[in-house]
Amino acid sequence: MNWRKLLHRNHSDADLSQEIRLHLAEEMEENVTRGMAPEEARRQAYIKFGSPQRVRETVWQQNSVAFTESLFRDLKYALRSLSRTPGFTLMALLVMALGIGANSAMFTVVRSVLFKPLPYKDAGRLVVLYQHDPSAKDQDNYVAPGNFSDWSQHARSFESMAMVTPWAAYDFSEKGGSYPEKIDAAWCSWNMFSILGVPPAYGRTFNALDDRPDANATVILSWGFWKRRLGGDPSIVGRAIFLRGLPYTVIGIMPAGFDYPEKQDQVWTPAHHEGSAHLLQSRDDHEYKVIARLRPGTTVAQSVSELDAIQKRIQEEFPGLPVEPGVNGRLLLDDLVGDYKTPLYTLLAATTCVLLIACLNVANLLVARASARRREVAIRSALGANRWRLIREQLAESFLLACAGGGIGVGLSSAALTWIRHVQQNMVRVDSISLDALALLFVMGVTLGSGLLAGIIPALAAGRPRTLEALQESSRSQSGGRSRARLRKALLAIEVGLTVVLLITAGLLLKSYERLRSVDMGCATGNVLTLQFSLPGPAQKRVAFLSELIERVRALPGVKAAGLVTAAPGTGWWEDTPVTVVEHPPAAKGAVLDPIARSADPDYFRAMQIPLLRGRTFSEAERLQNANVAIVSKRAAEEFFPGEDAIGKHLKLTQDPDTPPLEIIGIVGDTRFHISEDVWPMLYQPVYRGSFGQTTVMVRSDQDVENLARPIGQIISKMDPDLALGEALTMEQIIDRSTSSASFHSRLILIFAVIALISAMAGLYGVLAYLVTQRTSEIGIRMALGAQRHEVLRIMLIDGLWPAWIGLALGLAGASLTMQLVRKMLYDVQPLDWPVFAAVSLMLSLVAALACLIPAWQASRFAPMDALRLE
Amino acid sequence: MASAKKHGNSEMLKGTLDMMILRTLITGDAHGHTIAKVIERTSEEVLEVEEGSLYPALHRLEDRRWVSSYWGTSENNRKAKFYRLTATGKKQLTLETSRWRQMARAIALVMGEKIAGSGE
């Protein structure tokens, strides 16, 4: 084939004609020289040459791109035959578009979130390290600063090592008293920025001199915070801003997109300047992540085992403290995205199922078409059409559907990505999700792959057409197209199987979500408003502030009860404090009592409907030095005092050696620190003891509690205009937020499952309807011979339901094997939860029966004579 | 296509027509009719070139750049398309000739014919 000739075919054809004319003329002349009469010479020349037309045709064909030409024709045929069944075509197209769209959207999310390299220098050598107790259930723990300094002094596997705490916060104001705002911050070692290898956009990052207790206060701003609160003015570098009322010199501004360790962090301050001397010495105050850069050639495992040995020595040195005996570490990327792996892979698998179902659907459609055209194909192959040509016609249809689906799919997937970026704002690296060239390449690949898969199944399964058989068979069609029907049933069974797996996944996730939502938080959750702030200043001042505040809040109209607590239930761990029981002998090595620490006002338990199980609550008189009392939760009483009465015992706070032991005066019901976490022992101190700056005011009302957010905020800002307030959240909102990803995942999977179910049922309906038309005359004969209508109904129904049942069995088996993979996403639900399996089986059987009922019923309505005449 | 009706040997012709065309052109440029005549005469009229395959073959060889073509005047003063062997065409001819020799020798051996220098 020659492109130039292809484009000038007419021209070269004229040339060829000229050549042929010459040839004939020469031949004639030769014949004349041999002595023939001119007429005879001409005749002989033509006889010898044969048909000039044929030569021209052969050369023409030689010069044409046979494939593109007939491809165009194939596509035209395909378009025509698809438009003959608009309903099924539209359905197949829609499912294909959804399949391709959803699949490529999830592919993009998985690739962007889990695989795209981090925007840090040589990120493959960045590791995050934790203290680790191989025997405990809750494996990894944050690192205590004292241990960190041992690690960084002794470990040889790392170029450098930094610690960073993600949960610092400040009350920020530009100048004292103007628009205070509570901002999240990170305390970090000075070298964190150089370990990550990210230079500042303006100014400089910390140096070792900034990161000392006696240094001047310095701060580095995030790009977003600098733009939002400081007007994006670079001259802020070198000036001071106010954090918790103290001036901090701004030394640098990080570039846009830099958000380590947490997305919401607005500023960074040096860890050794901010942390108290006590914290920095501590062996048991787990506050920091450790991030380190490996030396070239060192593996994560090597570095971890080196630290493991160091940590073991530390544990032996401090037997009475909660020091884990080991170290765990992983690459920074794994640390960031670890929690997202299972849900994202599950969603990717689900969308792949939908895509497979879409392919099977199209394959099914094509098998149906192939059997309708069996006779035509047989005749054509009898006349010498080659097999590849016939297969190509089928492929054209599937490619047409796949390409149209791919086109719509790209649109869908870009819309889906926008939506995901919008609803999953808290997901790590969500900003890196974008439909880029590789994603588009993936869409194209998936589209072509789907087209090929859907087209090649029926084409190959049809095998070499047995021409004679087909011609004979289609003359009387009672037994016609059985093998095609078998293929369609097999495809359907797989389709139903995939649907069942999706349905079961959706069922398990929904059940788990529902379990999560019905968890008893241990306190009132309806019409409860929470507002958190942190109080600066000495204990005395804070206590006075709090007692005045709560009086004023209680006086507000609409407030039924109000209380103060460090942090509302369900908002997280916040603080713990290791304790020892004074009355007990020193605990065995390594056995440490480490309750969550809270402070509460005397009325908190009643206000939040947390039951007082024994003893009494705090009294108003128990303030400051006179408040060495404590209340423990039920779980704490059971775990710390097994078989004893906790009331009257004393607890010594090991982190505060100067305070006298606290006497336990009451036991209250358990509350959860996080909705999906197990109940943990909790220790309450009186809020008027003044040991916590962090406070949440909690208000219960019998009307719409959100209306109270404003008046409470006004009371506080009237009392202290510099105090920054957190977001006013109802308990319901807190629960919504901590279950939002569970709700997101379960709903998405449910949507996919429903799409799968609908297309599988459409397939089931299609196959049975086809079988009914195939067997029309058979049914006619049966009825003429006396078969009853209900028998016909039963026969046809069973015929149609078989693939559904086989598919159901396949799906149940598949699900029981694969559901272990989603175990991590399940709360309080086992992967083999039989009620879910049973419900899915029942639902699928019912829907399948419904899909089969219509064609089966139609079959039973045939008038026997009409059925026979149809032939 | 070579027709089986005319000659039993046309099957043989099929694979070797290209080679023979190239061989013919080594003695000088020629148009289609001359090429056919030369093949027929040098084969002592055993091989008859069917024009139905000659012209497609010529066009194919031209596409492969083994021959080039130009319009000239025939011995009888007619406008004719002449074909000329190109450098790659010469290479191809050498290749095909040696392949043909091997094949012919192999077939001869199988058929039990004596071959000069075979030592028999």
Image (spheres, rainbow, N blue to C red):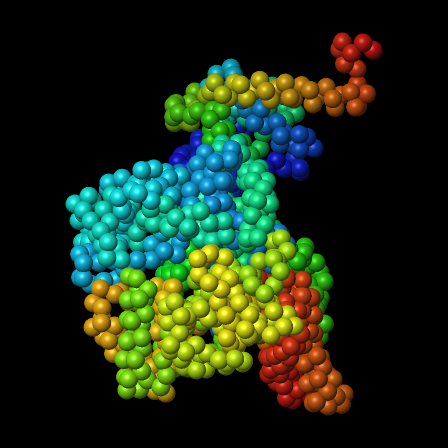
Residue A396 visible at all: no
From the viewer's perspective, is residue A607 above or below residue A214? below
From the viewer's perspective, is residue A401 above or below residue A128? below
From the viewer's perspective, is residue A434 above or below residue A22? below
Q: Residue at x 59, y 65 (%)?
A: A583
Quarter of image, res B37: top right
Q: Residue at x 36, y 56 (%)?
A: A168
Looking at the rendered structure, the number of numbered marks drawn on it comes to 0
Q: Residue at x 51, y 72 (%)?
A: A664
In depth, the one of A43 and A325 nearer the eye is A325
In depth, the one of A203 and A73 nearer the eye is A203
Percent across and percent down for residue B60 are 50, 32
In depth, the one of A792 and A210 nearer the eye is A210
Percent across and percent down for residue A407 are 41, 58
Percent across and percent down for residue A741 are 46, 66
Q: Residue furthest right?
A: B120
Q: Would you say A11 lies left or right of A81 here? A: left
Percent across and percent down for residue A466 are 70, 58
The quadrant of the image that shows the C terminus of chain A is bottom right
